[in-house]
Image (cartoon, coloured by chain):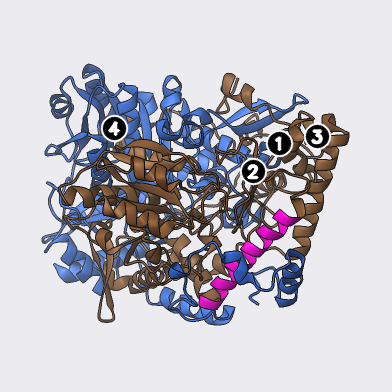
């Protein structure tokens, strides 16, 4: 990360301090009689003064955001090995199809006969996701992975209630992403943590002990956040199903096996799919994503509404259904994200999706091989799409995973994930994805090896990194203590 | 090998050699054979040209509101789109990055969020805003759950105006049940507005919030000072939902009236209708309640040299720290849409926003005047109620029939007002923005005359 903006970019509100009138955009001329708002709107509803926005010209606006963009790292800049986030290439054709006027300008409340193209697109993506997962049904409504988790857990809750078997506990392995327990709690469940076995996967004896008639189900990430496949998945599913529970599968790591294995065969009852991970839609600096949920036959009646239904060659919407959990959000989903995902799936197809997982897994194993002599590998289990190291070897010199991460910024890479899995202290979770060339993997591994060496020879230099970024190490503690979350004039 | 896959066949052979393997299959040996397949039941991949054609054919199968006069609104509005919005949005530094967990290489995204939070605060009159939520409907859900937390979980009753978008109320019902909340809906009076007395009566002394939308689902401006007063008297939180952000160019946000939360949908600020998404939920509240606020938040701080810098903050509220005790399970939200709204608002500017809102109001008033002059069965359902850029129109038939018959005349005249039911007259919700020219209005009037 050598590059930086020429000068610090002032906040928008600090520009044009005298608030002189400039023009940023030309509105269409008013070709109707102008009214005085004060004669139409209630006096007590009128805004007394304008919001304190400076008026800037179009070029000032472009320069402002151009300069700000220069301060960001992004997938287009280099490897972005943020584990569990699957930061793959965002194909440019996706951006074109999502901007087709016929799709982008479609209004969600047009009568169905006017939007047959949109409804077909939704239906086609549904069929594709069912084919990829081997499940019975799907909803495209959830706006993100965590939102999909909630939809899935609510469907499980509804199914159990319909059976007259309401339960109050959800099991979550200790290796799980933080959204899993948050989701279960949000849906009104108590969560019980399931301790992992020695190889990082579910301990069947522990599951056997905890899987009581209070347990609605288990939230299982496959492969888990260590990049390790639950090789006893079929036994796990059988045990949970035999005791009346259901299986929620976190599909955040679908990039590890799409095209090779089917969650439908693993016994999953619900699984969310992050289209912004496996299916290449951009992460956008923190969304919008999309978190469709595929479900087993048991949950199909409980899918959210509205649903797209195909009758002959015509598509319609079902707005209400008593068995449904209801609507998860407004309208039908992050539709323009769905457009991008279908574009990707059509482009790769059955053969391409398999190659995708193959290379993602190959790269993770290559990184594991290259770095194993420099970084400690807490779990020796076979690696799929991501590999988790820790900082045990570096802490002897008081160099921690966050220091390694910050030093990696100087080498021009985004760091690995560090905030989880919680079962690994000082984690460095690396997910390369299939997109980059092997040359990029080489450069990344060389950087990681160089940092390991620096940690031994000049630990202070690593501890004070980054040294070559637009701002130096940011004081996050101060931000929380002296809260300032908006600009004010004084 | 596909162009989006980084390693060709020769690369793969070389890597397999380094790993001491014969085949990639060996790397998948931990997956039981009984869950594996040789191929998926779908076609193989297709070239870019073929895929573009397929998607284009779907796009062309729609009747686009950009090609005919359109007055569709009901929570999703057509407004002008400065070219700079999409130009900036297309910069890979913004759209191919992720949540700014590493502030040293994310100052661009973080400063944008900080500016977005400020813009929302200034528009709504509130003290603090978050970085975004999924959409307007889930923003209402989060506001209700927030109010429940602020009231320490003691009060399970939620009071909603029926004139709050019915789709939003429907979404809330999905979440209210598992949260153990009781939702009470208060119908509007004869003037299409909810009354403070009815709200006060419904709230009693055991509710966590009163939520109204203004301008409401019928386009009518609610009496916000009276609603805030009713909430104060009932010792409950006052929540304003906004679905048409441009109205804030002329109307003061709930902050000025003493509301505790102003939230809703910011699609009007530069986001395409996009058949319903992605749109942009926003959430603003008082500073004292910030620790109960859902979602991401950017704050100002300094770096190790004392230079101003920004980072995500108060993450102790969030799922990755608090897990089962988080204020919300939200993780990925609508970051790029918040960027779009930020660019749009900054390009339009303060004076521009007022001019834009006045243009919407003027065109709406002109259409209402023309309808009042018409003979026959076309009527404004609430002729004296103050509206911003949308109103309820009744005519010869149900809203659904009117929408279809006017569409057959080449005009997308509005949204059927009973799509989700409602105690108001059935008819069409007609939205008029600065994009509706006088020619659009004439086309609509002509189509209506044919039907009456």
Asked if residue B169 lies left or right of residue B351, the reply is left
Q: Mark 4 points at which residue?
A: A42
Q: Which of marks 2 and 4 is nearer the N terminus?
A: 4
Q: Say whether mark 2 and mark 3 are on the same chain.
A: yes
- Span highlighted in magenta in the image: A350-369
Is residue A35 at all visible to an observer of this figure? no
In this rendering, the label closer to the viewer, 4 or 1: 1
Say whether marks 2 and 1 touch (CB < 8 Å): yes
Against B245, residue B233 (above or below) is above
Coordinates of residue A150 in the picture (x, y in percent) = 35, 47
In this rendering, the label closer to the viewer, 1 or 3: 1
Disc 2 versus disc 4: distance between alpha carbons?
67 Å
Mark 2 falls within which chain?
A: A
Asked if residue A163 lies left or right of residue B100, the reply is left
**Where residue A392 is drawn, which disc sits there?**
1
Q: Tell me if mark 2 has few (under 14), some (14-19) or many (20+) residues whose alpha carbon lies within 10 angstroms of its own.
A: some
> How many marks overall?
4
Q: Is A40 inside the magenta-drawn segment?
A: no
Q: Name the residue under label 3.
A: A462
């Amino acid at each position: 990360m050598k590059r930086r903006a020429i000068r610090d970019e002032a906040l928008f509100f600090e520009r044009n301090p005298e608030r002189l009138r400039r023009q940023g955009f030309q509105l269409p001329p008013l070709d109707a009689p102008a009214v005085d708002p004060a004669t139409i709107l209630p006096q007590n509803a009128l805004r007394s003064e304008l919001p304190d926005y400076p008026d800037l010209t179009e070029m000032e606006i472009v320069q402002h955001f151009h300069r700000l963009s220069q301060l960001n790292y992004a997938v287009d800049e280099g490897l972005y090995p943020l584990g569990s986030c699957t930061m793959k290439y965002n194909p440019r054709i996706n951006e074109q199809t999502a901007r087709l006027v016929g799709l982008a300008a479609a209004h969600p409340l047009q009568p169905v006969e006017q939007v047959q193209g949109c409804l077909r697109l939704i239906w086609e993506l549904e069929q594709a996701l069912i084919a990829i997962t081997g499940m019975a049904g799907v909803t495209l409504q959830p706006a993100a992975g965590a939102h999909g988790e909630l939809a899935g857990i609510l469907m499980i809750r509804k199914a159990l209630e319909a059976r007259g078997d309401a339960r109050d506990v959800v099991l979550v392995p200790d290796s799980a992403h933080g959204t899993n327990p948050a989701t279960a709690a949000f849906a009104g469940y108590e969560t019980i943590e399931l301790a992992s076995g020695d190889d990082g996967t579910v301990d069947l004896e522990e599951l056997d002990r905890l899987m009581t008639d209070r347990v609605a189900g288990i939230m299982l990430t496959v492969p888990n956040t260590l990049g390790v496949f639950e090789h006893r998945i079929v036994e796990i599913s059988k045990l949970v199903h035999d005791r009346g529970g259901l299986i929620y599968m976190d599909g955040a790591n679908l990039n590890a096996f799409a095209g090779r294995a089917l969650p439908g065969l693993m016994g999953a009852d619900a699984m969310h799919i992050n289209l912004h991970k496996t299916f290449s839609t951009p992460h956008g600096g923190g969304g919008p994503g999309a978190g469709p949920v595929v479900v087993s036959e048991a949950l199909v009646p409980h899918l959210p509404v509205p649903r797209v239904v195909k009758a002959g060659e015509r598509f319609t919407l079902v707005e209400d259904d008593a068995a449904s959990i209801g609507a998860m959000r407004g309208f039908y989903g992050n539709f323009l994200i769905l457009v991008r995902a279908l574009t990707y799936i059509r482009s790769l197809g059955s053969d391409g999706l398999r190659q995708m997982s193959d290379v993602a897994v190959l790269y993770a194993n290559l990184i594991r091989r290259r770095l194993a002599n420099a970084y400690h590998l807490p779990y020796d289990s076979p690696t799929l799409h991501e590999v988790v190291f820790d900082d045990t070897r570096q802490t002897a010199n008081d160099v921690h995973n966050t220091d390694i991460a910050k030093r990696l910024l100087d080498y021009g890479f985004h760091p690995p994930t560090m905030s989880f899995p919680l079962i690994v202290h000082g984690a460095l979770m690396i997910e390369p994805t299939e997109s980059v060339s092997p040359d990029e993997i080489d450069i990344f591994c060389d950087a990681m090896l160089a940092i390991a060496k620096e940690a031994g020879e000049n630990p202070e230099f690593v501890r004070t990194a980054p040294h070559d970024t637009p701002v130096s190490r940011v004081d996050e503690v101060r931000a929380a203590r002296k809260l300032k979350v908006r600009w004010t004039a004084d | 090998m596909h162009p989006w896959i980084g390693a060709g066949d020769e690369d793969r052979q070389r890597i397999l050699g380094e790993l001491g393997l014969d085949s990639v299959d060996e790397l998948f040996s931990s997956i039981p054979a009984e869950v594996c397949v040789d191929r998926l039941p779908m076609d193989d991949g297709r070239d870019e040209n073929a895929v573009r054609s397929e998607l284009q054919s779907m796009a062309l199968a729609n009747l686009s509101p950009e090609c005919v006069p359109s007055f569709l609104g009901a929570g999703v509005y057509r407004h002008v789109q400065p070219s700079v919005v999409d130009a900036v949005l297309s910069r890979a530094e913004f759209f191919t990055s992720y949540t700014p967990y590493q502030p040293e290489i994310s100052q661009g995204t973080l400063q944008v969020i900080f500016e977005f939070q400020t813009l929302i605060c200034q528009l709504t009159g509130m003290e603090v805003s978050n970085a975004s939520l999924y959409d307007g409907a889930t923003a209402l859900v989060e506001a209700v759950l927030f109010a429940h937390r602020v009231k320490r979980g003691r009060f399970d009753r939620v009071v909603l105006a029926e004139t709050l978008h019915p789709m939003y109320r429907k979404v809330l019902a999905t979440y209210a049940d598992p949260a153990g909340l009781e939702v009470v809906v208060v119908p509007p009076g004869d003037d299409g507005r909810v009354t403070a007395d009815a709200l006060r009566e419904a709230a009693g002394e055991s509710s966590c919030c009163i939520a109204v939308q203004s301008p409401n689902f019928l386009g009518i401006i609610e009496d916000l000072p009276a609603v805030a007063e009713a909430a104060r008297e009932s010792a409950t939180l006052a929540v304003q939902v906004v679905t048409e952000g441009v109205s804030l160019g002329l109307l003061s946000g709930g902050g000025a009236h003493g509301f505790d939360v102003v939230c809703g949908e910011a699609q009007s600020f530069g986001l395409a209708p996009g058949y319903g998404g992605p749109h942009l939920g926003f959430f603003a509240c008082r500073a004292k309640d910030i620790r109960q606020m859902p979602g991401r938040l950017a704050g100002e701080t300094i770096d190790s040299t004392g230079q101003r810098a920004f980072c995500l903050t108060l993450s102790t509220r969030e799922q990755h720290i608090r897990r089962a005790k988080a204020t919300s399970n939200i993780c990925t939200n609508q970051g790029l849409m918040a960027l779009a709204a930020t660019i749009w608002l900054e390009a339009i500017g303060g004076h521009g926003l007022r001019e834009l809102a006045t243009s919407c109001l003027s065109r709406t008033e002109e259409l209402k005047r023309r309808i009042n002059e018409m003979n026959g069965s076309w009527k404004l359902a609430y002729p004296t109620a103050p509206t911003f850029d949308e109103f309820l129109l009744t005519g010869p038939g149900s809203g659904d029939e009117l929408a279809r018959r006017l569409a057959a005349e080449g005009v997308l005249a509005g949204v059927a007002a009973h799509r989700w039911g409602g105690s108001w007259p059935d008819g069409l919700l007609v939205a008029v923005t600065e994009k509706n020219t006088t020619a659009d209005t004439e086309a609509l009037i002509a189509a209506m005359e044919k039907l009456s």
